[in-house]
Amino acid sequence: MSKKLVLMNRDGAVDDYLSVVLLMTMEEVETLGVILTPADCYIQPAVSATRKILDLMGRSEVPVAASTVRGLNPFPVLFRRESFAVDRLPILNEKGTIDTPLISEPGQNFMVRVLQDAAEPVTLMVTGPLTTVAQALDIAPEIESKIQEIV
């Protein structure tokens, strides 16, 4: 039986780090990447923390991309600054290097490319705003047929 293809799109909220951890433990899923949307976070520390978590879990093959599409109503600074605290957790900084690849193209373009290249429809796991998904569909409307479902 083939694995379910999943592309995760999240913001950098504290609860979403747990979502990443849980997704990485699902043996029936092939995670094609993790895209962060800057809404409930500051993007650089959220991307860094996500890459470190993937390394810690032995999943450094899963690429990470940062969307340049901002959420329409970003959370207040008090909430967004938590991304710095997570990125500084001692357990995430023991190694000193990050192996998980950071995709250089914007997350919305990465989403388009992943969906276009997928051999079968992909499930989008979205735990943040849908602005990156909307932008990807604006860029390449034909990718809609490659989306199995959005959860």
Image (cartoon, helix red, strand yellow):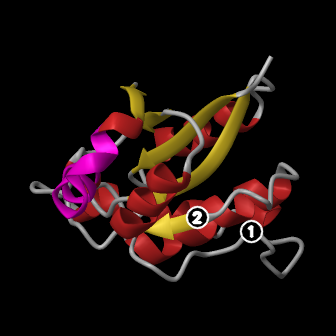
Q: Is residue 120 left or right of residue 137?
A: right
Distance from label 2 to label 1 (Cα)?
A: 7 Å
The residue at which mark 1 appears reads as: 100
Please state which amino acid type lies under the numbered disc 2.
Val
Residue 75, percent from left and from top: 20, 54
| Residue 125 drawn in magenta | no
Mark 2 touches mark 1? (CB < 8 Å): yes
Magenta stretch, main secondary structure class: helix
Task: Give the mark, 2 or 1, whose residue is nearer the N terminus.
Answer: 2
Q: Is residue 29 left or right of residue 59?
A: left
> Please, is residue 93 above or below residue 125 in the view?
below
| Residue 142 drawn in magenta | yes
Which stretch is magenta?
A: 133-144
Residue 86, percent from left and from top: 58, 60
**Residue 54, quarter of the rendered image:** bottom right
Q: Residue 64 shows which numbered tag?
A: 2
